[in-house]
Structures are given as structure tokens and as C-alpha cells.
């Protein structure tokens, strides 16, 4: 089997990672938002209602967040729609996450076939750990995500 050119492999992996990131839009939380919650802050919203900025899509980081204004009709507040623009930083971090995951899978396969050395693992593994900590920091720092 011919060896895949490393530049072609990079383009292919980034393309696949972008595709996986776009597919992660289907991971929407909370799931059943159909209207805007009119209850005061701290009160429980009725079933099917969400507050502004509450509905999000994307995995591991939500790169789509419901945002009022900016052309969003008032009937669309509280739910995700086409008018809700992606957060470019979170989108790129998600692409980076999936790229690193695909690179690690490719590297492990090459290592098992005896076509790679352990030296590259010294670069990929710390990069993966750093990216995982970065994503975990964003996930647990909720005020940053809510805007």
C-alpha cells in the first residue's frame, strides 16, 4: 500500500475534523427548547421553554449558542436557529480537538504497523493533554460560555 503524503494527510485530517465538528451541531443541550422562558431569574422554566443563551450545540465545546439580537426574530429567542452565528474560537478549538484525535489514531495505527517511532508521541501526547485541559477549563467556567 503506498504511503500517504504527510501534507495530503494533514489536509485530509483537517477536513475530516471540520466535518466531525459540523456534525457535532446535532449535539444540542437542552434538547426540548421550543420557546423563550418568561419566568424570573431563579425560577424554574416550564417544559419546552429555555432562557436566552441556554440552548447550545457542539461537542466538546458548544460553538453554537442561542443569542438574541443580530437579526434574530423575537420568536426565535430561547431556541437555536439559522440566525445564531457560531463562535469562531470554540469552532476552531473543536476542529483542533478532532484533528488531534484523528492524528493520534493515525499515529497509533502507524506505530502498530511498525512504520512510526515513539519520538512523535513526545509531541502529540502533551499537545493532547494541553488541549484537553483547555477544553475542560472552558467547560467548567460557565460564565464565559454564557455570552
Image: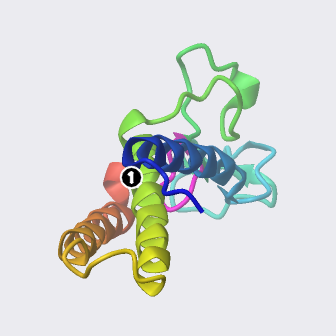
Give coordinates of residue 8: x percent, y percent.
46, 42
Q: Residues within 10 Å of mark 1 (few under 14, many from 20)?
A: some
Q: State whether residue 72 is above or below residue 105.
A: above
Which residue is denoted by mark 1 in the rendering? 96
33 left or right, relative to 77: right
Residue in front for this viewpoint, 28 or 43: 28
Q: State whether residue 86 is above or below residue 71.
A: below
Residue in front for this viewpoint, 67 or 86: 86
138 left or right, relative to 118: right
78 left or right, relative to 114: right
Total tally of numbered discs in the picture: 1
**Quarter of the picture holding the C terminus:** top left
Residue 17 seen: yes
Classified by dominant secondary structure, the portion drawn in magenta counts as loop
Residue 147 seen: no
Give coordinates of residue 21: x percent, y percent.
57, 49
Give coordinates of residue 24: x percent, y percent.
64, 53
Q: State whether residue 53 is above or below residue 131.
A: above
Q: Residue at x 67, y 44 (%)?
A: 38
Q: Give the range drawn in magenta.
A: 57-64
Residue in front for this viewpoint, 128 or 62: 128
Residue 110 sits in quarter: bottom left
In this view, the residue farthest toward the front is: 1
Q: State whether residue 24 is above or below residue 86.
A: below
Q: Does the magenta stretch include residue 59?
A: yes
User: How is the protein colored in the picture?
Assistant: rainbow
**Quarter of the picture holding the N terminus:** bottom right
Give coordinates of residue 86: x percent, y percent.
51, 33
Q: Which residue is drawn at 48% across and 82% down?
A: 113
Amino acid at each position: 500500500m503506498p504511503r500517504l503524503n504527510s501534507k495530503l494527510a494533514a489536509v485530509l485530517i483537517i477536513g475530516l475534523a471540520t466535518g466531525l465538528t459540523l456534525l457535532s451541531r446535532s449535539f444540542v443541550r437542552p434538547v426540548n427548547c421550543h420557546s423563550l422562558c418568561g419566568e424570573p431569574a431563579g425560577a424554574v422554566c416550564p417544559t419546552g421553554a429555555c432562557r436566552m443563551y441556554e440552548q447550545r450545540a457542539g461537542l466538546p465545546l458548544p460553538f453554537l449558542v442561542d443569542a438574541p439580537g443580530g437579526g434574530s426574530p423575537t420568536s426565535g429567542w430561547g431556541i437555536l436557529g439559522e440566525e445564531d452565528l457560531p463562535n469562531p474560537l470554540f469552532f476552531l478549538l473543536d476542529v483542533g480537538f478532532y484533528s488531534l484525535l484523528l492524528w493520534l489514531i493515525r499515529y497509533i495505527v502507524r506505530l502498530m504497523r511498525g512504520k512510526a517511532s515513539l519520538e512523535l508521541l513526545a509531541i502529540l501526547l502533551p499537545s493532547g493533554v494541553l488541549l484537553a485541559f483547555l477544553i475542560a477549563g472552558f467547560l467548567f467556567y460557565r460564565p464565559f460560555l454564557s455570552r
